[in-house]
Amino acid sequence: MKISRLVLPFATAAVLAGCSATGPHLKSSISEGVAGIEARLPYANYSNYFGYVDSSVKPEGKYKGKDTYYLYAWVPAAVDEIGVSMISPAVSKPEAADFKHANFTPGMQKDADKFFDTYIVFDRLNIIDNTQIKNGGNVLQNLGRNDDTSELPANPSGANYNSLLRKTTSMNNPSEALVRGVYRISFTSFRSNVEGSFEATVGTNVPGVKIAASLEELHELVNGNKL
């Protein structure tokens, strides 16, 4: 927990000054008050992934009977907390450091207004060796799920149907520790078809988190072209 309490307070003044309109929408579980105003503090590091789902993107699984799509994140070190959010449609434009699906740009050119009501599930896989990412693995434990939150911008219908969850590590239970390794974000929708753009964000207090739509692609991002 020392990392977050050393790093995050430097952002307190900016957050409380009202920078949330331009800063990251996903905030940590830590909050601080100044002059009677309480606000959540940002994570030290963010990794963003931009995607677009249409008929050319095939679902990879099922969750409670619904077609489900996967994103995979590599977290290079043990962390005190991981935050995950998904917004649809994407409200930002990808920057050079962001991760982007090949379908994002053509999808946005076709219909930038299409969106879906997000539902996310966050799992830890049993992959801790970066050289073995391409070989796959199994879900070791579920770390949370979320359907709706008022902490994120509402979708174009005005409903708070975007998703956010946070998971903190356990100091007393090794099986609940947020260790170095691969984590999976599953996403679907229970109110609509999964069609349109999305912006997924992973917040941590360590640099080097990478996100991809497949384990093979994640392996390349983490290790270079060593398939």
Image: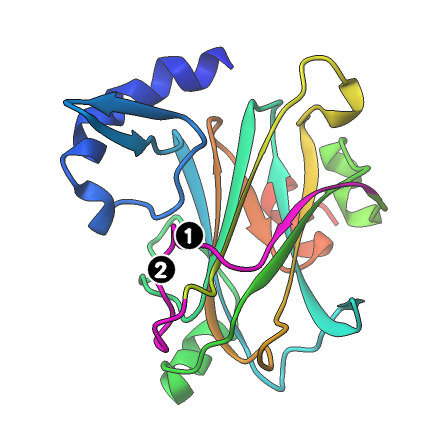
Residue range of the region highlighted in magenta in the rendering: 140-159
Which residue appears at 82% of the width and 37% of the height? 126
Q: Is residue 59 above or below residue 5?
A: below
Residue that mark 2 sits on: 94
How crowded pointer 1 is (Cα within 10 Å; few <14, some 14-19, many 20+) is rated as: some
Q: CA distance from mark 2 to mark 1?
A: 6 Å
- Please name whichever residue, 141 or 35, is drawn nearer the observer in this view of the structure: 35
Is residue 125 inside the magenta stretch?
A: no
Q: Give the residue type at disc 1.
A: Asp
For badge 2, the amino acid type reads Pro
- What residue would you read off at disc 1? 98
Left or right? Give the position of 138 relative to 31: right
Element marked by disc 1: loop
- Identify the residue shown where x is 35% and y is 18%: 7
Which secondary structure lies at badge 2?
loop
Answer yes or no: is residue 225 visible.
Answer: no
**Marks 2 and 1: CB-CB under 8 Å?**
yes
- Check the image and report above or below for 116 versus 216: below
Residue 44 in view of the camera? yes
Q: Position of residue 130 (x, y in %)?
A: 72, 35
In the foreground, 60 or 176: 176
Q: Is residue 177 found left or right of 1 in the rendered image? A: right
Relative image position of residue 202 (x, y in whole percent): 50, 44
- In this picture, residue 141 sits left or right of residue 102: right
Residue farthest toward the front in the current orientation of the protein: 36
Q: Is residue 90 above or below residue 10?
A: below
Residue 93, x across and y down, in percent: 31, 63
Asked whether 157 falls inside the magenta stretch, the response is yes
